[in-house]
Image (spheres, rainbow, N blue to C red):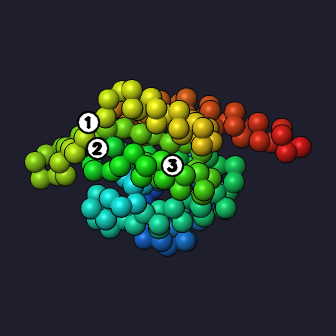
Amino acid sequence: VAAIRKRLPLCSVEVLIPDFLGERNSLEIVMNSNPDILNHNIETVERMSDRVRAKAKYRRSMELLRRAKEMKPDIPTKSSIMLGVGEEWDEILQAMDDLRAVNCDILTLGQYLQPSPKHLNVEKYYPPEEFALLKEEGLKRGFSHVESAPLVRSSYRAHEQVKSAAQAREERTVSSS
């Protein structure tokens, strides 16, 4: 992050990190680099996590996002869920609630697309209308920014996410003073 800022001082830096197997020191190093956004994707709902994410654990991911916000409350946190691997609607809403419970600021929701026959099958293709409903649900839950459409990926419109997060941070600062 420091090297990027030295070369491109006006560049926003978003870091996408693993769960570090729960190791706190690695997260501290990342947070102390002061990225503009910390991104850690939960990828799926809790019930599907072991099937979709071989080594990562849903609750460990939530703990990582909670710790990140605890360490640096002003750095926006972000996560992403890919839909279509067998999750139920209420599980998606619960994942949103879980993310908000750890003060995650930004959410992206996109359609899972099977990269090869060796990967998980697509269990459902969500229509754009359902993605729109999920965006509304995310905003109602308090995310500062939600991207939700079939082709959305975690980096989708990242520049707008940075702006939304900065505006939300300013609003929190003004309202608390």
Q: Amino acid at mark 1?
A: Tyr
Please say if the residues under marks 3 and 1 sit with CB atoms less than 8 Å apart.
no
Q: How busy is the neighbourhood of tag 1: few (under 14 within 10 Å), some, or many (20 plus)? A: few
Q: Earlier in the sequence, mark 3 or mark 2?
A: 2
Q: Which residue is more in the foreground, 153 or 112?
A: 112
Q: Earlier in the sequence, mark 2 or mark 1?
A: 2
As drawn, the label of residue 96 is 3
Observer able to see residue 158: no
Measured as percent of width and height from the top left, residue 24 is found at: 55, 71
Q: Which residue is mark 1?
A: 125
Measured as percent of width and height from the top left, residue 21 is found at: 42, 71
Vertical side of 175 occupied by 49: above or below: below
Local SS, label 3: helix
Q: Amino acid at mark 2?
A: Gly
The CA distance from mark 3 to mark 1 is 20 Å
Q: Quadrant of residue 45?
A: bottom left
Vertical side of 11 occupied by 47: above or below: below
Q: Amino acid at mark 3?
A: Met
As drawn, the label of residue 84 is 2
Measured as percent of width and height from the top left, residue 4 is found at: 53, 43
Q: How busy is the neighbourhood of tag 3: few (under 14 within 10 Å), some, or many (20 plus)? A: many
Please say if the residues under marks 3 and 2 sit with CB atoms less than 8 Å apart.
no
The CA distance from mark 2 to mark 1 is 6 Å
112 relative position to 175: left or right: left
Measured as percent of width and height from the top left, residue 168 is found at: 69, 37
132 relative position to 170: left or right: left
Local SS, label 2: loop
Q: How busy is the neighbourhood of tag 2: few (under 14 within 10 Å), some, or many (20 plus)? A: many
Report the residue at 55% width, 71% height from top: 25
Q: Earlier in the sequence, mark 3 or mark 1?
A: 3
Please say if the residues under marks 2 and 1 sit with CB atoms less than 8 Å apart.
yes
